[in-house]
Amino acid sequence: MGREVFGGAPTTTTTQANKVAAMSRRVIPLLLAVVVFLAPRLSSKLPASLLLLKEKLGLSPAAVAVACWATAAAAWAYAVSRPRPVYLVDLSGYVAGAPHEASRAKTIAHFGRCGRFCDESMAFQKRMLERSGLGERTHFPESLIRVPVDMCLRTAREESHAVIFGVVDDLLRRAGVAPAEVGVLIFNSSLLSPTPSFTSLIVNRYGMRHDVVSHNLSGMGCSAGIIAIDLAKRLLQVRNHYHYGLHVSQ
């Protein structure tokens, strides 16, 4: 289970760029008029390279000055229209204790002793453990390593609460971010989707701001982690008053 804090750099966002562009349409013509008026007076002060270009191309001082201003305006418009950069501030992962550790062989033997799985189910679990990339020191939830196996909503919630609160506490402390500074909260879970949602649980647990933008993604498998990261990035890019986003992946 992983946690990430994303920070948006305090630069101009796309929404701001649209406002700036609208203002530019009103201001730039006025600036050009001023340049045309002042160009004859400034022509004597142009650098030697610009004077040479003016003589070769047969351009008037006003045309040269307007071209320079147009280039600067285009460069400025390009700079303010770029998407807001988003960076990874810090991350934290949950590591269970030694009692939760088990090898693949020990796990299969444990599931066989439980008496809840048929031969076909046991063969499938063995193939899954061998092909999924799980190592010989994989950590399992307590509900799966006890006898009998206790797979119910209560144990799933207890496990989720212990993991989420522990690792989010560690992440916020290490990143130096207060819960009230988090403006975007994204939670994704491969399977479990309780009511109330995990985002509501986190918001109320840490006393986050009332207008925090939260999304709860569930039932999408492991791919939801990448989707959640992209969603957090996009939300930070369009909301310039939010500087931090928290992504929780289970």
Image (spheres, rainbow, N blue to C red):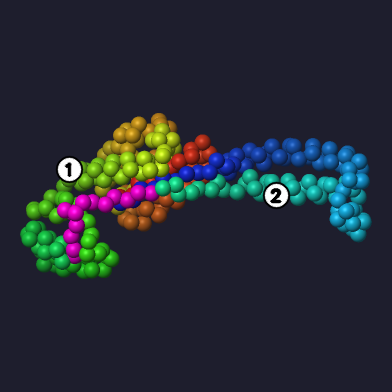
* Image coordinates for residue 170, horizontal then vertical, percent: 33, 43
Q: Residue at x 17, y 45 (%)?
A: 155
Mark 1 falls on what kind of element?
A: helix
Q: Residue at x 39, y 35 (%)?
A: 179
Residue 122 seen in this snapshot:
yes
Which one is in front, 209 or 153?
A: 209
Structural crowding at the residue carrying mark 2, measured as other residues with C-alpha within 10 Å and reported as few (<14), some (14–19) or many (≥20): few
Residue 211 shown left or right of residue 30 in the figure: left
Verify whether residue 248 appears in magenta: no
Which one is in front, 229 or 169?
A: 169
Residue 78 shown left or right of residue 64 in the figure: left
Q: Residue at x 87, y 42 (%)?
A: 36
Q: Amino acid at mark 2?
A: Ala
Residue 186 seen in this snapshot:
no
Residue 193 shown left or right of residue 24 in the figure: left
- The residue tagged 2 is 75
Verify whether residue 102 appears in magenta: yes
Which residues are the magenta region? 91-104
Residue 223 to residue 183: above or below: below
Q: Residue at x 35, y 31 (%)?
A: 207
**Closer to the camera: disc 1 or disc 2?**
2
Which disc is residue 210 wearing?
none
* Image coordinates for residue 219, horizontal then vertical, percent: 30, 51
Mark 2 falls on what kind of element?
A: helix
* Image coordinates for residue 112, horizontal then vertical, percent: 9, 63
Cα gap from disc 1 to disc 2, whole angstroms: 58 Å
Residue 250 to residue 185: above or below: below
- The residue tagged 1 is 154
